[in-house]
Amino acid sequence: MGLQVDAFAGGVGGNEVAQGYQDVEDPSLHFLVPVLDDTGHPDGRHLLVWTTTPWTVPSNVGMAVDPDLTYVEVAEGGRRLVLAADRVEAVLGEDASVSDRFPGADLVGLRYGRPLEFVPVPDDPGNAWTVVAEDFVSADDGTGIVHMAPAFGADDYAAGQRHDLPMLRPIDDSGVFDRELPTVGGRFVKDADPLVIDALNERGLLFRAEAEVHSYPHCWRCGSPLIYLARDSWFAATSTLKDRMLANNDQVAWHPPEVGEKRFAEWLRGNVDWALSRDRYWGTPLPVWLCDRDETHQEWVGSFETLEERAGPLGQDFDPHRPFIDDVTWGCECGGTMRRTPEVLDVWFDSGSMPYAQWHYPFENQEDFEAHFPADFICEGLDQTRGWFYSLMAIGTMLGRGPVYRNVVVNDLVLDAQGQKMSKSKGNTVDPWEAIREHGTDGLRWYFIHSSNPWVPKRFDPDGVQEASRKFFDTLANTYRFFILYANTEAWSPSETDPAVHERPVMDRWVLSRLASVSDRVREELEGYQLTRAYRVLGDFVDDLSNWYVRRSRARFWGNDDPRDAQAAFRTLWDCLQTVARLMAPVTPFVADWLHRSLAGESVHLQSFPAAGELERDVGLEGEMEAARRLVSLGRAAREEVQIRVRQPLRSLYAVVPGGGVGEEVLELVKDELNVKEVSFLASAEGLVSLSPRPNFRALGPRFGKATNDAAESIRELGQEELARFRDGGTVVFQVNGESHTLEPDDLEVVEEARGDLVVRSEAAHTAALDPTLDDELREEGLARELVNRIQRLRKDAGLEITDRIRLGIFGPPEVRAAAAGWRDFISGETLALDVSVADAGSSDGWDAYREFELDGWVAAVGLRRVQG
C-alpha cells in the first residue's frame, strides 16, 4: 500500500481530471511567515508567500524556493519581506525599496514559524516548517516562494517525500475539515477559505487577499470542483517498467507519428506508479483479502476456483460484485479472518484488460486469444494517451506480452462549420441523428474520410457534406444508371464469352489498367492507415470513369454495329463498377452493398477486398493517356481563348509531350476530343513560341539598388536559349556593369508568345499549339455538328426514348442546307433519322416537334416525327 495523490469528488483519477478544467474565480492570497533564528525566535524577516487555495494553509509544512533564482529583502510597511527579485515590481510596485540581494540557496534550510496552528503537530515532524530547494519553483507568477502541503498536491507530495516533510491531512474523504479543529472544523474546504484569511489577518500575517480567475479542475461528470488528496491506496509499480514500455511503444505505428513519438512517449518517460484502487461502491472489486488481525497477512485471488478453495463453494448464483463479494471470508492461519479490502479497481484497469477479458483469457479460448493478439489497430481520441492507450500498454507490459496493439489511429475533434469546438453553451452542437437523416450515414462517412485524416480536426459543414456527396455518389449513381439503362436495352449480362482484356479497344484497356493502379494504391494506403489518401484516389477514379471513359465510349453502348465491341464496353464498365463497390465497402457500406447487389446479385460484404496485383496494369498506356488528356485540356483552353466551340472542327494541332508522342489509338482520341483533323508531334516548342523576359523590379531593386535599371536592361537582352534554360530551372548568368550575377527565380517572368496565328498553351513540359484558321469545308462540318446538337435537344424535349426512330426535316438558308445535305449520313446516324429532308422553309404542320433557332447568325429550323413500330 502507499499514498495516492488522487482527486476528490468521487476519487477521479489524474487522466479524468484533465478532461474538466474550467476558468473560475478563487481567492488570491499573499501571506507572511516569520523566519526563525537558531534559537527558534523570529529574526525580523518574513517570507512573502502566495496561494490560490487558502484552505491548504493550515496543512503547510514547508516552503520551496529555487536555489538558482535571485531573491531580495524589501522594506515594506515596517517589515522586512523576502521574495524573488523578478516578482518585486508585480507584487510590491515599482517604488519598492530593496535592501539586500542573495541567491535562493541562502534561504535553503531556514526554519520559519507556522502560519496557522489549527492542526496538531505530528509525533514525528521530520523537517517540518523548513525552506527547501525545488526545481518546480519559478518567478513566472506568485512570489517565487511556494507554500507546500504534501497531502494536497502531486509536486508537494513528491517534495515532501524527498525532504522528509510530514503530511498533515485534516480533512475527510468528503472534503470536510475534522470537526475538532478550531475555526475551520466541520467546514467544506472551499467554504473555509474566508475563515483562513480572517485567521491570518488576526495574527498579522495577511498581506493581501484578492480574487483571481484561473483554470481549475472540475469533475467532468457533475461539474463539482476537485481537490487533490493524499490517501492510502494500492499501487502497481509501473514506474519500474518505463524502459520496457518505451521499448514496446517503439514497435507501434502511430497515426500521426508525433503523438506516439512525443506526447505518448513523454507520458511514459514521466510515468509514476499506477494507483489501482478507488473508494467507490460500483466497479470491479479489488481481489485482495487481508487478515483483520494482522494486515501483513494478505492474499491476491486470481480465479473463482482459487476463491472456492479458500472460502468453500460459491454456488451457481454467485455474484462477484459488491456487496456480495464482501461477505466471502475465510480463516487466517493466525486465527484472524480474511476479509476483502473494500476498494474497487480503477476503471482504467478494466479498460486496459479488454483484450484478455473479451476472450475470458487465460481460463478459456487460448487459441482464439493468441490468434487475435496483439490488435492490428485501435482508435480513440487524443485524450486517451493518458487513458486507454496507456492502460492497454501498461497491463500488456506488466504481463510481459509486449505491445498490445500494432497501430494506433488518433481521432481528433469534430468542430462546427466555423472551426469552433462544439458545446451546448455555445449552441453550436449538431444532432447526429438529424445529420444522418439529412445526409445519410454513408454521406457523412465519405465526407469525414475524404475531407481530412482522422487525426486532423474536422469542420462539420453541411454544405461541404452535400458537395462531397454530390461529387462522388451522384457521379457514381449516374454512371450506374447509364450502364443499367443500356445493359437492359441491349439485354447484356456478363459471361465467359466477353472479350479478353487484351482484345478490347484502347479505352477499355486504359480504364482497366487505371483501375488496377487505383486498386493497388487504395490497398497500399489502407494498409498504411492513410484512409484519406486512399479514398481521394478512389474519388478521382470515379470522376475519370464517368467524365472520360463513359463520355468517350458512350456511342459503343447502344446501336453498335460491332457486337464484340459493345460486349467489351459493357464488360469493362461492369468490371469497373463492381470493383469500385468492393473498394468503397469499408467506408460506405450501404451504397457499396446496393451497387454490388444491383450489378452482381450478391452482397459486397461477402466478397473479398481486391487483392494486390489482382488486376493487370499497362503502365505505358497509362502514361500515354495521361499525356493525351493533358493535351486535350490545353487544347480546350486554346479554343476558349479564341472562342471557337468544340463542335467546330479545326485543321491541325501541334503538340510537344515528354517521350515524343502517343500511340495511334490514343492519338485518335485526342483528335476526336479536340475535333481536329491532324496532330503533329514536335521535339520541342521552340518553333511554336517565342520567349520574352519581364523583369521583376520588386526583386531586382533590393539586390541592385541604383543599378536596377541596368540589371533590367541586361535581362531584356537575354536570348531564347537562355530564357528557355531559365524557364526549365537551369542556371543563367548575366552581366550588370561588368559584374556577373546569377538569375534568381523571382528576378523575371518568362512570357511565352505564340508565333503566327497559333494559339499556344503549355503545362508541365506539355505544349499544345492550335491552328484556329477556318475554311469553308471546316465551317460546313461545324454547322452539321451544331444541327445534330439542336436535333438531339429537340428529341429530348419531345419525350422520345433513346431507341425511337424519326423522320427529320431541316430548313434554312443555303449555308444551312448545304451543311445538312453534305453531311446527311452523319446527321441521320447520330439522330436515328430514317430519312432527312432539306428545304429552304418549313412549318410546324405535320411534325411531332418543330423548333426554330439561330445558327451562326442564320435562322434555321428542324422538325421531327416519330416513326411508329
Image (tube, rainbow, N blue to C red):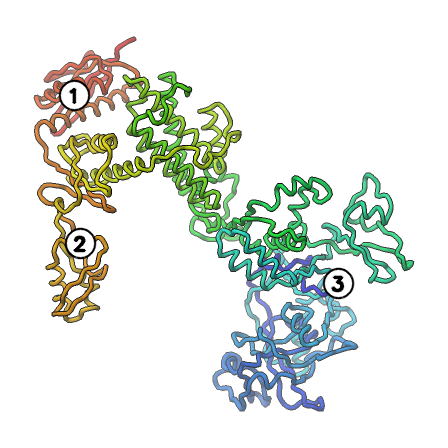
Residue nearer the viewer, 660 or 279 = 660
Callouts 1 and 2 close, C-beta under 8 Å: no
How far from the left and from the top, in percent, is residue 678? 16, 32
Q: Amino acid at mark 3?
A: Met
Residue annotated with mark 2: 750
Instruction: Give me the residue at 79% from left, 56% from top.
Output: 341
Disc number lying in front (1 or 3): 3
Disc number lying in front (1 or 2): 2
How far from the left and from the top, in percent, is residue 13? 65, 58
Quick check: can you spot residue 542? no
Residue annotated with mark 3: 1
Of mark 1 and mark 2, the one earlier in the sequence is 2
Residue nearer the viewer, 16 or 673 = 673
Quick check: can you spot residue 507? yes
Mark 1, Cα crowd under 10 Å, few <14 / some 14-19 / many 20+, is many
Q: Amino acid at mark 2?
A: Val
Q: Quadrant of residue 580?
A: top left
On screen, residue 117 versus residue 640, left or right, reads right
Please, what secondary structure does the residue beneath circle 3 have? loop
Answer above or below: position of 43 versus 369: below
> The N terminus lies in which quarter of the figure?
bottom right
Of mark 1 and mark 3, the one earlier in the sequence is 3
Callouts 1 and 3 close, C-beta under 8 Å: no
